[in-house]
Amino acid sequence: MTRSPVFETFRYAAILLALAITLVPIIWMTSMAFKPVSEWQATGADLTWIPKRPTFENFRYLFGQSETTLIVALERTATKPILASLLSAGFGTLIAMGAGTAAAYGLSRFGSGGNLPLALIQLRLFPPMAVMIPVMMMWAFLSLMDTWWGLALIYGIVTLPFAFWLMKTFFDEMPREIEEAALVEGCTRLRVFLKITLPMMRAPLASATLFVFILNWSDYLIALLLTTRQWVTIPVYMSSLASSMTGQLYGAKAALGLIAAVPPVILGIMIQRHLVRGLTFGALKQ
Amino acid sequence: MSVTDTPPAPPPTAASVPADAVRLGHWLTLPAQILILFIAVFPILMQLYISLTDWSPLSGRPWPRAWELWNGFANYADLMSDRRLWSAVGRTALVMIVCVPVQFFLGLGLAMLFVDDFRGKRLFYSILIMPMMVVPAVAGYMFFMLFQSGGPINDIFGTLIGRPVVIAWLSDPTLALVAVMIADIWQWTPLMFLILLAGLVGVPDDQMKAATLLGANAWQRFRTIALPRMKTIIIIALAIRVIENFKIFDTLYIMTSGGPGVATETISVYIYKVTTQDLIWGYVAAIALVILIVLSVVAVLAMRRMAR
């Protein structure tokens, strides 16, 4: 369809405006991450969008290798929180994908677990805040407080609905002829699932795994309640980078924010095609 | 792109599935069932028990002995007259009523610009959906920086009107709420855009062309052809945002901690504060349980309506 030049002009103007609004916060944080201490709080005429003296100081500072004397040395470096985030989100994703994929296959092929769809939708619906008191009590009882494995367990449960629904829609769409042929050849059903179905579903499995990982990586509230010191995750550690003694460590926080924000954005763009399906529980797909 | 209306194969029924398949099916669904039991049944029973007592982690007894602090339905009576709670409920509703429609219309408008091809479409699309993938806590910190009184937002406004602007966004009760809503809109408009665009692209091109030939203008084409086909998609998009918006915590808490005072305190923030600062867990359990019940009723009603 040919469009009028007026429409084209309007379209580019509107999109450019949207791009500007989208990018301002991202650009500001990126720029802040590379600003030296002296520029952190520059205001008025001194405020700059591009650092005057760009530096990796903030990143070095996070990992305990800063030479600067302007700010108090960190009591704890960012290494362990990054590890905590990776381990809890990673293993949480494994739990969700393991249980979710198996259950999705069971429901899709054999009609088992008919209660799961509704139960999992309800799980998605409830604010985590509304079950956190008993979860904190249970986690304390099981000695899971302030551990990455305790966090991984709750992440696995919270993102189970996404893993289940995504994999269920993928299994529903998969042609069954190959599975049936293998059955006729004498394979057991478990072998068919493990040796034929799963390898065929490699690509969807990978997308679903990345999607679930992004969700787990993004958590703040649960880690805030279930970790206190040893295994705080990046977002929790980030809020601790401000105290009455040090003030807001703007640049260091921005550098950490960048470290936290980059992986999910890259992964998200990689799985763009499946985002709609993942977010709408498989009700919509591209 | 389409709405999945029916699964490709008829769902298996008990009679048609051989015994070995049934057994495997049970084993496969078992882990998920256990996880759900673990997170739903125990916590809710525990929550119910605690909510009928005055128990708190500081009460000097382990929780199984909470019955020594039995107070019947006093917690439930208290929450009815808890002004701070109800103002948090109202504020959560206000944030939802403002943010969800704004996200919807901005997302729809953008999506309509992206239906047909133009130069740079893929790149623009990838950039526009970035905010929803930024970790919410990090997004909160971005906006915390942007809204400082000497920060870039005031700088941009200052440049636009030609004289310095010093607005203390996050320490003014009204403006803090506005700032929090702007952050939410920034982060979640892309979600609406993404879903609605997927819906718009699914509208058959030939019907639109036919309507154009018949003299329908853009608005008429959208209203009579695209809109009816997109009904389900629109409902799903709105439902997701309403559900998520109700839980709003991360960005907001990082930006304002619910302050100044209680000016940006939503339900989740309120519960968080009462849980970690006041430590009256019996009372929090009562609030949480009421929320769970109300949401369950809403969910069941909504599903019945959707089913029709």
Image: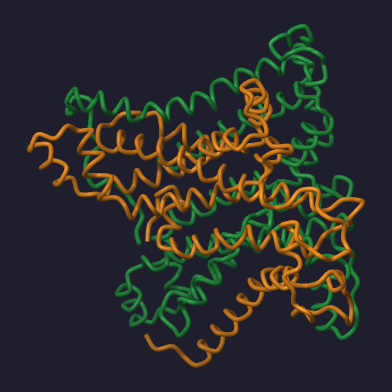
Chain colours: A orange, B green
Most extreme residue toward the bottom is: A5
Query: Can the viewer see residue B69 in this picture?
Result: yes
| Residue B161 vertical position relative to residue B226 in the rendered view, above or below | below
Tell me if B162 is positioned left or right of A34 in this view.
right
In-front residue for pair B188/A58? A58
Q: Position of residue B31 (x, y in %)?
A: 41, 28
Instruction: Point out the residue furthest to the top here.
Output: B68
User: Residue B3 sits in which quadrant?
Assistant: bottom left
Figure check: A38 above or below A3:
above
Q: Quadrant of residue B229?
A: bottom left
Query: Is B69 located above or below residue A48 in the figure?
Result: above
Indicate the quadrant containing the C terminus of chain A: top left, top right, bottom left or bottom right. Answer: bottom left
Front residue of this view, candidates A61 and A262: A61
Spot occupied by residue B194 in the image (x, y as percentages of width and height):
49, 63
Decide: is B255 above or below A95: below
Give residue B244's position: percent from left, percent from top. Answer: 60, 47
The residue drawn where x is 24% and y is 44% is: A197
Q: Is residue B215 left or right of residue B150?
A: left
**Residue drawn at x 61%, y 75% as measured from the top left:** A18
Residue name at image x 73 percent, y 37 percent? A228
Where residue B199 appears, as percent x and y from the top left, is 42, 63
**Res. B305 in view:** no
Quadrant in which the N terminus of chain A appears: bottom left
Number of numbered discs present? 0
